[in-house]
Amino acid sequence: MSIKILCLNLFFFLIVINTIAAQNGSIKGFVQDNQTLEPIEYASIAIINPITQLVVNGDLSNKTGIFLIKNIKPGTYQLKIYFIGYETRVLENIKIQDNQNIQLEVIKLKLGNQALDEVVVSSKKANSSNKIDKQQYKASQFETAKGGSAIDVIKNLPSVTVNGEGQISLRGSNGFMVLVNGKPILTDAATILSQLPANTIQNIELITAPSAKYDPDGKGGIINIITTKGSTDGFALYANAMGGFPSTDDYDNLETPKRFGTDVTANYKNEKIDFSLTANYQRNDNNGNREGDVYTKDFKANTITRFPSNGERSFDKHNYSIKTALLYSANKNNAFNFGFYLGKKFQARRADLVYNNSTSDLTTDAVLSQFTYFNSNVQTKEGKFTLANFDYTHSFANESTLTTSALYEHANLYGNTINLNMDYPAKETVFQEVKNPYTNPISGFRLKLDYAVAIADGKLESGYQYRNDKQDGTFGYTINPEPVPLVDNSQFRGTAKTNNHINAVYSQYSGKSEKLDYVAGLRYEYAQRKVILSTDINPHLLNFSNLFPSANLLYTFNDAWNAKVGYSKRVQRNNNSELNPIPEREHSETLEQGDPDLLPQFVDLAELGINHTFKKGTFFTTLYYQNIKNPVQRVNSVYNYTILNRVYTNAERARLFGLELRTNLNPKKWMALYFGANIYNYKINGDLDVLGEISTVNNSDWVYSLNANGTFNLDKNWSLTANVNYTSAKPTAQGEDSRFLVPNMSVKKTILDGKGSIGFQWQNINFGNMNSNQQRITTYGNDFYTTTNYIYETNVLLLNFCYNFNKLTPKNKLPSSEFGEKEF
């Protein structure tokens, strides 16, 4: 390991040496907020000829607020500094002589009189940006997501798709990493994002070719959620309330769905203290139906058994949490951040289905037996989360910084799946009751040390991180009455313990040379995984040592055009659900289990993009490629003639290449349009080991998705927003997921002199044969076929109220679940 670190440091030393070169005629400066004294990133700085008023040269400030403009001819110029939401500053009589390098004093910008949200309405350019390492989108442009969760926001982005079951894909990959305010969250994406209220989100960043300073987790890249917190000096309050109207469609479900919620963010700030408190509660039930058709073949008995089903599939869901954060700036060199989080999430999924079982002769199709029964299936999941985090940052005299951070989490996870098989249609006699109760507590912590120093015209960043998480699951199984003759059910109950240790070091250098921005880095990681099972005397061990290189380049041709290229190596680790081999009776027809020897997925990401800015908007397009080793697949096999076994296994390889584009248009002052599209070709091939049986998969097809959003300001106080999300059919290892369509609309009225608003939403719009908000999942093999159409509630009507007392801007980092929610 020491040799690799030495080589890594030598590599970056050579980069630094090659970038140290004197530049003639330059101006360097630092831009910050005049009240918070925080650096302003992406401020525009222009050198202007005072006679012609033409722009001679310019730059954007970096994350530390620093800008550098080189190769300026001798003369006298104006320097113009501007950023959306702030007053523009102009410095006069900037004189440049031969070989002169000017270091300006700190440039402080004042907040403008017009609120930032008002600026966003009038200029679509403010709603998105494309930088060297990320795409950034403002959540405020997606009004139809108000009252929902982060999932309702991100599904509008060109790289992101969400299917009917709530599974999220980034550029076709289900695995990606979630950051909240830049802090890594080792959780299942759908779980964490479903708990973040859309109203509290400021921006979403898509980091599709992450640099070495980020954890390499997530084969699709990173989604960073930036929440709305912090304020100028004094007190600020932001509150939202949401209520749902009665369902417009009847699905003949057992219960009426309840939909209501609220979230409040309060903040107090003075010169040294910045305190934030966020509380939220959300109840968001969903009605729906499920139509299934399944058959299995027994070639030895020469029979085929069909068991189609029909009935209710609904969800009761609620969650609440309290987050608090305290930022204490002892002086200009030392800052402390403390955070605490308490939360609970509950979900009950009901699948009450009527099964019509029949067994026929495989040759003649003559019916040998028939049986109809009712299966009531209720799966509950609950989680209680407690987290604490601490960050300390020290700034040295040479403007370098040292940051240490620690996070600890404990999550108490528990639940049960109950299957009742009853007579039909009377539903009076219970033939069989099966229960799968479980407890699955998890604890984990993360320690980080990061150092950043300015060298030449760039920045060198290095760091070390240690991660650990432990999970101790106990899984029960009872069946009543016991089958006759008695069978051994020990394989369905037991304990599964998982322990992960990860050590990592990284270093990267970023800088700018004339029109070229660049960042290159290398990360080394040593990981250990141990799975201990009560059903196996031998522990399942996995150790791996890997290098994760990354590089990004951005070349600016002029003010209107730039191009970027990026590469990043990533890993998708296996979660504990995928590793747990103890079967769970998911449905009457399904057993689900994992594999303790499952391998992590490794992926190479590469992209090439072009960005264009014009008078009426922006446009970008990106070609990308993913090469995936050990792709994890959830596949089916026959357990017995009426039960399918759903298992996780590795395929050998998959590859994906595609084209992504996005355009923002502002054709009229009262109109803002957004359009995003993504088309890719996905191929998976190799052998699948399904519980010891080997089968070969070779499946490929084209997939595309479309997202469109339009905002129309009808007058000063009224606006209309409409959007649509569409995903085409997608191939899987054993079949296909059908297309998925979701249109939405909202009307918003501003009240209380701009401090409040009332919004009416129409979600999951469905007319005639649109078949909105439903998706068919189909898989098949040599001896089985299964297809299920999930029909989710449509024409959902919601009413939202928002109130903003004083202005909120992002500042503190409130804690979010680090380990526990991925196992929820």
Image: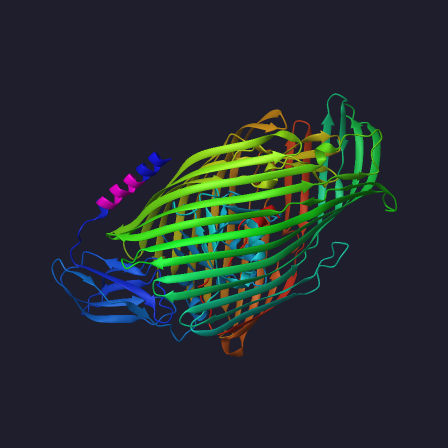
Q: Is residue 708 magenta?
A: no
Instruction: Please name the residue shown 67% across and 44% down the image.
Output: 789
Viewer can see residue 405 = yes
Question: Which residue is farthest top?
Answer: 300
Q: Picture coordinates of residue 792 (x, y %)?
A: 67, 52
Q: Main secondary structure of the magenta part?
A: helix
Q: Picture coordinates of residue 640 (x, y %)?
A: 74, 30
Please state which of residues 614 and 638 is positioned toward the viewer in this rendering.
638
Judged left or right of residue 526, residue 96 is: left
On-image quarter of the N terminus: top left
Position above or below: 274 against 472? below
Quarter-wise, where is residue 287 in the image? bottom right
Q: From which residue to which does the magenta span run?
A: 9-17
Please state which of residues 781 and 637 is positioned toward the viewer in this rendering.
637
Q: Picture coordinates of residue 199 (x, y %)?
A: 54, 64
Q: Is residue 13 magenta?
A: yes
Question: Which residue is farthest bottom?
Answer: 753
